[in-house]
Amino acid sequence: MISKKIFKFFTTVSIFFSGELVVIGETHNSGLGPLEIRPQFLVNQPFLAMYPENTMTLKKGESRFSIGMEIANTFVNTQGPTNQITKKELKRGLILSDFLNKEGEEVRGFSLYLDAESKRKKIKYKFGISDSLEFKLEIPYITFDGGYMDNSIESFHNMIGISNFDKGGAYRALSEKNQYAYYVVKDGKFVYSTSKQIHNIRGEPDAGIKWNLFGGGEIFPAITFKITYKFANKDRSGEQKLIRSGGMDWGHYLMFSKGFQNWIIYFGDGETKIGESHDFANSLSHRFMAMEYRVTGEDSFIFQTVSQSSIFPKTNANPRSSSGEFQEQRNSNLSVPTSVSAFGYKFFSGTIFWESGFVQDYNNFGNETDFVFFWEIGVNW
């Protein structure tokens, strides 16, 4: 995996520069980064998802309040290679037979037709319990609709030579632009089937503790551990089942950061345990690597990669393949780990802070959102 190679590279670089810092002099091990962005794939939305954070915690008695939004464009058509779901079938309304294989037989494992733009708004509050212990509460509000990014994404594909009629373009040209449809099939039965848009439905809140175990020094990195719980909301009536799992999830993340001159390297490893999986994975593993460049003392540019195990568990489908007529073989791509890259900017001056950036899925296996734009703004006191 590319992400594993990058992880090893970051680790090697951090160790190398740790030695150099003895000569260069003391430097901080925590900056403004990393980017605090969770997975935005539609099927992940009901579950807790651990995301990267700074190893530094708020000081005792310090508070931070912020609001933010993550806008994601997701398109997956597992029936695209066989032209079984096109504009014609969508206009008629998708039915289970659209997800059978070309011989009319049941497809083992998962099949998807996802065409949506999700908007995850969040309210976040943090409080410094002590100089090394921080509390966090986060409440999401989620919208699924047709959005407006399809034209831009398809035009970009055309500009760089990717056809929207084949796998590289996710078979987008087979569907109308800026439409909403959410269909997930497992072993010939619908898990989700809707084309009804939802707006600003409150998801399940989560709360957590972040503990800075060690601030680091000239040689050793800063080390921080966090643990988070998602509270269960049993009301999953109607479309609320798309954004609530009804189970209590929990997760942990161990994070490291090492600074040298204007650069700071972050990396971490964690896991989420899912209380009510509803036919999906019972746990998710997470790993991230980030490099921050401090432009000034108030702002930074950050490059980040995040890998995660798939929300789709492995099935009886054959080993993954990007081509072929057998849908069981092709759709098993959904169970492989995901990898995304992100680039962002952070600003913090006085009491005001700002974060914005974008995320891109570069593997295109159909188990991750295509593109995410995000921002967060808040105050510190």
Image (cartoon, grey):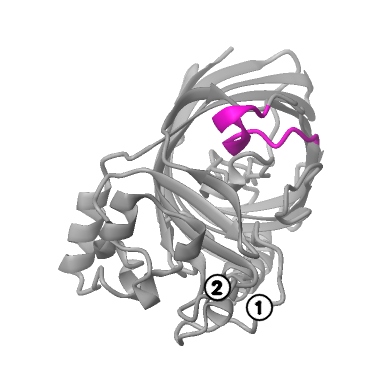
The percent position of residue 111, horizontal first and vertical second, equals: 54, 64
Residue 246 magenta = yes
Q: What are the residue bounds of the magenta stretch? A: 236-248
Q: Residue furthest bottom?
A: 324
The secondary structure making up most of the magenta span is loop
Which residue is located at x 63 percent, y 84 percent? 319
Residue displayed at 74% across by 32% down: 246
Residue at 58% x, 78% y is 328
Quadrant of the rendering where the C terminus is positioned: top right
Task: Using residue 332 as the reference point, say whether residue 292 is left or right of it.
Answer: left
Give the distance between the C-alpha atoms of the residues marked 1 and 2, in whole angstroms.
8 Å
Residue 331 to residue 138: above or below: below
**Residue nearest the viewer, comparing 40 with 271:** 40
- x and y percentages locating residue 357 in the rendered image: 39, 43
x, y percentage for residue 45?
Answer: 58, 41
* Badge 1 vs badge 2, beta-carbon distance below 8 Å: yes
The local secondary structure at tag 1 comes to: loop
Which quadrant is the N terminus positioned in? Answer: bottom right
**Foreground: 252 or 257?**
252
Residue appearing at x 45%, y 64% in the figure: 98
Relative to residue 293, is residue 61 depicted above or below? above
The amino acid marked with disc number 1 is Ala
- What secondary structure is found at the residue carrying circle 2? helix
Q: Is residue 355 visible?
A: no
Q: How many marks?
A: 2
Mark sitting earlier along the chain (1/2): 1
Q: Considering only vertical position in the picture, is 49 above or below 312?
A: above
Q: From the image, tell me which residue sits under label 1.
A: 317
Is 83 or 1 nearer to us in this picture? 83
Residue at numbered disc 2: 331
Front in this rendered view, residue 195 or 331: 195
- Residue 140 figure quarter: top right
